[in-house]
Image: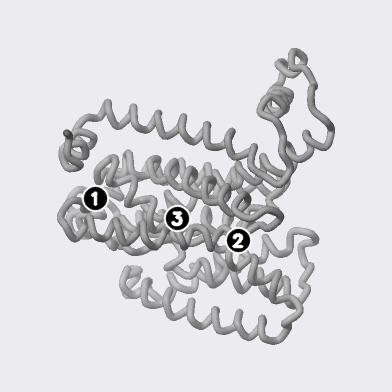
Amino acid sequence: MISYRTFRTYMQGHEGTKYLTMFFLAVLLLLVVIFSTFIGSVHISFMSVLQIYGSQIPFFSRYIPENYTAIQYTIIASIREPEVLGGLVVGASLGIGGAVIQSIFRNPITEPYIIGLSSGAALGAVMTIILGLTFFGLYSQQILAFIFAMASVIVVYMFALRGGKAHPTYMLLTGVALSFFLSAIVALLLFSNINLEDEAFFWLLGSLENINWLELFPVTVVVVLCSVILGTQYKELDALQMGDTHARSVGVNVERTKAISIFLVALSVSAVVSISGLIGFVGLIMPHVARMIFGGSNRFVLPGSALTGAIFLILADDIARGSVVGVVIPIGIITGIIGVPFFLLIMRKMSGGRYGN
């Protein structure tokens, strides 16, 4: 019987196998997306779902029989599809963001939220809910969550500057301090208006339920652009994992690479948090899963983290939607329940010498 160590060594030592595994994950993601549209309080047959999918394909829809009702079409096309694809975009963004942040900070237990994103987004969203802010119309909550998240990252970055350089340690400490401060303000706002606590708490625990096409499209564009640019930085990120001194010795502009990478992660994650709320553990765990499969090179870890993050979050949303009939559990609860033991298992493998960055 092949041992875990032998299997992992084989996987990480053969580039062709890595590409094949990446292809397998992409196919698995596609199957998970299709499967997830079947889950919900309203039962829709397999053939009806496939016909609805086919009817949305240009030049192909004329050959698809319409053996489904208008209500079924609305449920699939306007409710379940944006929710599932929203899970794909959010999970991919958090996964790749976590991999980049862990490479920059050289810390296996960091995630995108550590640089102040979550607390800033939470304050923006809760202010919209509690104070009834409507500066940007129907999408005031999403836009203010995004603005406050980006503002928090800028504050953290500015406070971490020492001699024109942003030190990772200062960024971590400033991020933690700012998170506590903004969390206190959020708690004060919640305490001041108990009537709206439920809506605010539901956002704070994360949900894909209310994502629609109009808000998903611009977020997807932002995530794709940021992810592509980050993907071109894999060599620089690999060098940063070895330390700033090593990175400089091989010609990497350390400060510039860190600043650009952190900005792109902040932009991407702030965008997805604005429509999904706070969803934990995806950005922390999925980069480790990708490294266990592909090794330490960000050439494979970045897309691997995006794929595993998307798969994990969509499946977690399936559990949230299908676990209790008539009740949608916030997805952050599901990711926490699954994520904690999973993270402890990864830590055990790391301490046993079976895994490392």
Q: Residues within 10 Å of mark 1 (few under 14, many from 20)?
A: many
Snapshot quadrant of residue 234: top left
Tag 1 or tag 3, which sits nearer the N-term?
1
Tag 2 or tag 1, which sits nearer the N-term?
1
Snapshot quadrant of residue 44: top right
Of residues 306 and 29, the one nearer the viewer is 29
4 up-or-down from 116: above or below:
above
Q: Position of residue 310 (x, y in %)?
A: 49, 44
129 up-or-down from 293: above or below:
below
User: Is 73 left, or right, of 308 in this rendering?
Assistant: right
Look at 17% across and 55% down and name the residue there.
246
Between marks 1 and 2, how big is the CA–CA gap?
A: 38 Å
State which mark lies toward you, 3 or 1: 3
Between marks 3 and 1, how big is the CA–CA gap?
A: 24 Å
Tag 2 or tag 3, which sits nearer the N-term?
3
Between marks 3 and 2, how big is the CA–CA gap?
A: 15 Å
User: Is 327 left, or right, of 9 in this rendering?
Assistant: right
Look at 68% across and 42% down and name the residue there.
80
Looking at the rendered structure, which numbered label has been put on residue 239? 1
Give the residue at mark 2. 330
Amino acid carrying mark 1 in the image: Ala
Pointers 3 and 1 in contact (C-beta within 8 Å): no
Q: Position of residue 293 (x, y in %)?
A: 29, 41
Secondary structure beneath dot 1 equals helix
Indicate the quadrant containing the N terminus: top left, top right, bottom left or bottom right. top left
Q: Residues within 10 Å of mark 3 (few under 14, many from 20)?
A: many
User: Is 279 left, or right, of 39 in this rendering?
Assistant: left
Looking at the rendered structure, which numbered label has been put on residue 282? 3
